[in-house]
Amino acid sequence: MELQYDITKEDYIAFNLNYFDNNAIVQRSMLTTRIATTAICLLGGTGLMYWLKLSPWSVVVYVALAAVCFFGVPPYMRRKMIKNVDRILKNANNKQLCGSKTLTLEDKTFRLVGENEDTTYQYEAVQRIATDEGHYYVFVDEFSAVIVPFTAFENDEQRLSFYDRITAYIEDEALKC
C-alpha cells in the first residue's frame, strides 16, 4: 500500500494538540501549574492584604484572580503551544516537517519519504497509535509520530486496512486508539 499526502501546518498543530490533550505527563504538569498559580494568588494576596492592612473585601479580588489563574492556564498554554509550533515550522531548519510525503507499507517495514527525509521503520517499532477526527498518529517512540491524515486514504476500507496493518504488532489494545 502506498499513500501520498501533504502534511500542512494545521496537521502538525493538530498532532501537537492531540499530544497536549492526551499525554498524562502534560496533563499532570498542567494541573500542577494551575494549583501553584492559584495558591500563589491566594497566599500572596492574603499576605499582601495583611501586610498593607487592606480591607478584608480585597480578598474577593484575590479569589477572583486565583479563579482566573486556575481556569485560564489551560487556554493560555494551548495558545502558547500553537504559537511555538508555528514558530518552529517557520524555522528554515524544520521545513521538512511539512510538505509532500509518501508512506509505503511493505511486508515487514513501512517507509516514509519526504523532503530531506527517507526513513524506514519496522512494524515492531510502532509503540502506539492515536487518532483524532482527521488523522492517525503512528508513534515510533515516546514523542515522535508519523502523521497520516485521513485524506490520504481513498476510502474507509483502505483506512481500516492501514490501521489493521500498522497496529498488527501492538499487543496492548489500550495503545490502539
Image (tube, rainbow, N blue to C red):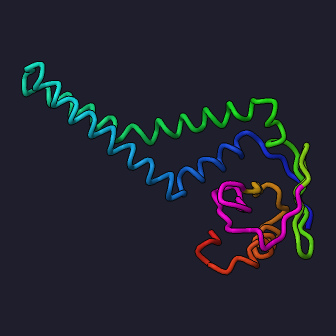
Q: Is residue 50 magenta?
A: no
In this rendering, position of residue 101 left or right of residue 21: right
Q: Quadrant of residue 131?
A: bottom right
In this rendering, position of residue 9 left or right of residue 57: right
Question: Residue at horizontal 74%, vertical 62%?
Answer: 140
Front residue of this view, candidates 36 and 78: 36
Q: Quadrant of residue 162?
A: bottom right
In this rendering, position of residue 129 left or right of residue 94: left
Q: Quadrant of the N terminus?
A: bottom right
Question: Residue at horizontal 39%, vertical 43%?
Answer: 33
Q: Is residue 124 magenta?
A: yes
Front residue of this view, candidates 79 and 126: 126
Front residue of this view, candidates 165 and 126: 126
Vertical relation: 28 (above or below) 115: below
Vertical relation: 45 (above or below) 31: above
Question: Residue at horizontal 26%, vertical 33%?
Answer: 41
In this rendering, position of residue 68 left or right of residue 24: left
Vertical relation: 140 (above or below) 7: below
Q: Position of residue 35 (x, y in %)?
A: 32, 45
Furthest residue to the bottom? 171
Q: Position of residue 31 (x, y in %)?
A: 39, 49
Q: Position of residue 89 (x, y in %)?
A: 74, 35
Q: How many marks?
A: 0
Q: Quadrant of the C terminus?
A: bottom right
Q: Quadrant of residue 161?
A: bottom right
Q: Position of residue 120 (x, y in %)?
A: 89, 62
Residue interval drawn in magenta: 119-144
